[in-house]
Every structure is written in structure tokens, then in C-alpha cells.
Image: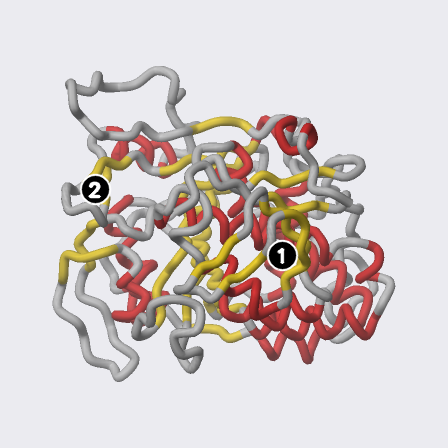
Amino acid sequence: MIPGMRATLPIPPRRGLPVPAAPGTGRQRALLGSKNDEKVRVAGGSGPVDRGGKGMLTVSPRHSLRRRAAAGVAVALTAAVLAAGLAAVGAYRKLEGNVDHDDVDAGLGSSRPADSPATNILVVGSDTRAGQGSGYGKQVAGARADTLLVLHLAPARDRAVAVSLPRDSWVRIPSCRRPDGSWSAPVTTKLNASLAIGGPACTWKTIEALTGVHLDHFVQVDFAGFKDMVDALGGIPVCLPQPVDDPDSHLDLPAGASTVDGEQALAFVRARHTLGDGSDLDRIERQQDFMAAMVRKATSNDLLSDPARLYRFLDAATQALRTDEGFGIDDLARLAHDLDGLHPHQVRFVTVPVHDRGDGANVIWTQPQARKLFDAISNDHPPADPQTPTTTPTPGDKRRPAKARSLPSDLNDTTARQAPCPE
């Protein structure tokens, strides 16, 4: 591992995106309001990720704000790209058919947390390497949830909280319905194994049981699907302060600026021991950052003004998506514009508090902090101020408190701007 390794992604400025017309109508879609509100609202402002001019997205500092924000921003931008693109190419029906949908109701059971007026969406970034061989790292059978977060939207859509859940959380996975209709036995293992055991319904059921938060929808993105998306975009520029030669992922890049194609992009997001601090959390956050950089390039006018390229990108993007049956492309677009209407200080990014399990590979949710966090989400209360810890760690305690901070209005990264990649 190269100590202190930093990687940066150049990010073009974001442009305003239209809300697509609803299929079969000539009017704009209503934004995703509260569950009982069908009124049309107009999203104001340019959203929490607006920035002017060129900027550099810093990938490396493990606890940087941009990493905390990356997952939520990426979800919003992905949906916004779909919204703008669908309106531009007029291929809603075909692209909607690309998205896989799961009927999760049979796998959730009847013992669930109480519903609420708020909307809670499970976002899963899956590491599905079926058929990929071991070209991008050590082979893992089946699908694993590389990125997990719960996106909470207040009923009035005046606040949002994105709670990241470490995939290596050591938890109890309840009995889950398998694809063949049989039921698994409860097991204590890594949280990300739930996806392999019983698909998205099992991950949904597990997180509801762990958090007490009622989930309304899920969005799963197959990370391997980004290969075709990156190629459709013509590659993604990255900047490395030092050369990288990773034998596990076969990533071989020089120091300085490079444009990675789809194959290299998969290696870039899979590399673990030659980028960042070598931890799995660091790798996952790099994946989130890369996705945010990719969809930012997809929102550039160069792509939106080229119908052929835009369609290739949207075709690849929608083939990488899986949702529950009640959540389609139009819902994703409305979600994006709901988030876009929020002021930066109304959006918070939190990671569930954890401490090391002691085996060098897994973490355990720290109590009572984790329970208080999810109680706040369930009751639609803002998370507690992380600057006021609820407990005082004892000497030698490795517990890491949750981070909760608002997104500042200026997302320019000072460190990156002081040392930009050579043009």
C-alpha cells in the first residue's frame, strides 16, 4: 500500500436538468412529495451539488465530507441523468423495460416496523461478478452488497438524511425467502451477505429488523454495469499523485492524469491495497466517488446534445438498475428533483457508529448511539449533533462515533485546487 495515497476526479460543472413529461401526458411530472400529497411542486435552486467552473473531487481522505455525501449525491444525479435523458431521447418505454423489478412483498413478512409519512429508500450498490472471473480482484461467489445506505426524506421534503451502513457490519440476518421459495435459517454474519442469501428482500428485511425503520422502496445498482456506462461516456478522467500497479485488480496507471475506460474503471474501484488507506471502507467510498464523477460527466451538455451517445449511456445505466415493483424510472426522476430542491444545509450524511469486532475484518454497531440514530430517523427527527457524544470512550476503546454534518454551499476542494492535475 502507498501511505497517504490520494486520487482525484475532475468534475465538470453541473447544468440544470428538466423534469421529463409523464408518459402519455404533455405536462411535467409532479415531484415526489409526501405519501399522501400529489400536488405539483417546483424544485428551486440548483441543488446541493451545484458548483461553478472546474473542480476536483477528492477521493482519498477517509472521513472527508465529500465521501460522506457521495452516495446520496450519486443517487440523485443518476436519477437526474435518467430524467434529462429520457426527455431528450423519447425512449421511455424501451429504457423502462431495461430496469429489473423484484416483488419483495412475499419476502418481507408481516412483522415489520410501523409505517410513517416519511419516505425511506434502501440504496444498494452490488458487487456482482458472475461471469467476470477473477480479473478485478479476488473472486467472490454470488452477489454482495458493497454499498448500503438508507435515504430518509421528511414528509414535507424539507430535510433529508442519508445513513451509510458498513457492509462489514457483523449482524444477525433473519430467516429469508430464497429464490427457490425455501427459507434460510437465521445466521450471524456480515451484513452484505444478506443479498446473496435472499436477494434485495433479504437485505431489506435485515435492515428493517436491525434499525426499526420502515423502508418503502429499494434501488440496487450493479456495479459491474458501470463498465458499459463508462465506455459509453468515453471514459472518466482520474488523477493520481503516484503510479499504481495493483496485481489483484490488474490496475496499472501512471502518476498524473489518465482517462480510464470501462475495464480500467472496474479495476480502479476494486483496488484495495494500492489506493487510499487499504481499508474496505476506503474502497467503498472510492466507488461512491467514482459513481458521482461518472454521472456528473453524464450531465454535461456534450452528452445531452448527442442523442446517440446519450442513448447508449442510458441503455447501459438502466440495465444496471433493479428496484421494487412500485418504483420505476419516473419515480427515480421525481426523487432526484425532490433532492435537488433541498438547500445544502437541509441534507445530512451520517454513518452508523461502529467499533471493531476484534477480528480485524468486521465491525459492530455501537450502542446506544446506533439505536438513538435510528430512533431519530423513525420519528423524523434530525440526528443528534455528533459534536456532543453520548458516551465517553474508555482508554484504549476503538469505537468510532457517528459523523453527521451538513453539506456546505461551496463544494470546491481547497486542497485539490491548490494541486490540480496537469492539463
Nearer the observer, 332 or 394 = 394
**What's under tag 2, amino acid-wise?**
Ile
User: x, y percentage for residue 345?
Assistant: 59, 26
Q: Looking at the rendered structure, which numbered label has been put on residue 364?
A: 2
Nearer the observer, 423 or 351 = 423
User: x, y percentage for residue 128?
Assistant: 41, 71
Q: Is residue 385 above or below residue 207?
A: above
Using residue 291 as the reference point, say whether residue 169 is left or right of it.
Answer: left
Depth check, mark 1 against mark 2: the one in front is 2
Question: Which image quarter holds the C terminus?
Answer: top right
Nearer the observer, 15 or 368 = 15
Q: Looking at the rendered structure, which numbered label has been put on residue 78?
A: 1
Q: Looking at the rendered structure, which numbered label has been put on residue 243?
A: none
Q: Distance of mark 1 from mark 2, alpha carbons?
A: 31 Å
Label 1 CA crowd tier, 10 Å (few <14, some 14–19, many 20+): many
Q: Residue at x 70, y 37 (%)?
A: 420
User: x, y percentage for residue 221?
Assistant: 50, 64
Using residue 3 as the reference point, say whether residue 56 is left or right of it.
Answer: right
Label 2 CA crowd tier, 10 Å (few <14, some 14–19, many 20+): some
Mark 1: secondary structure? helix
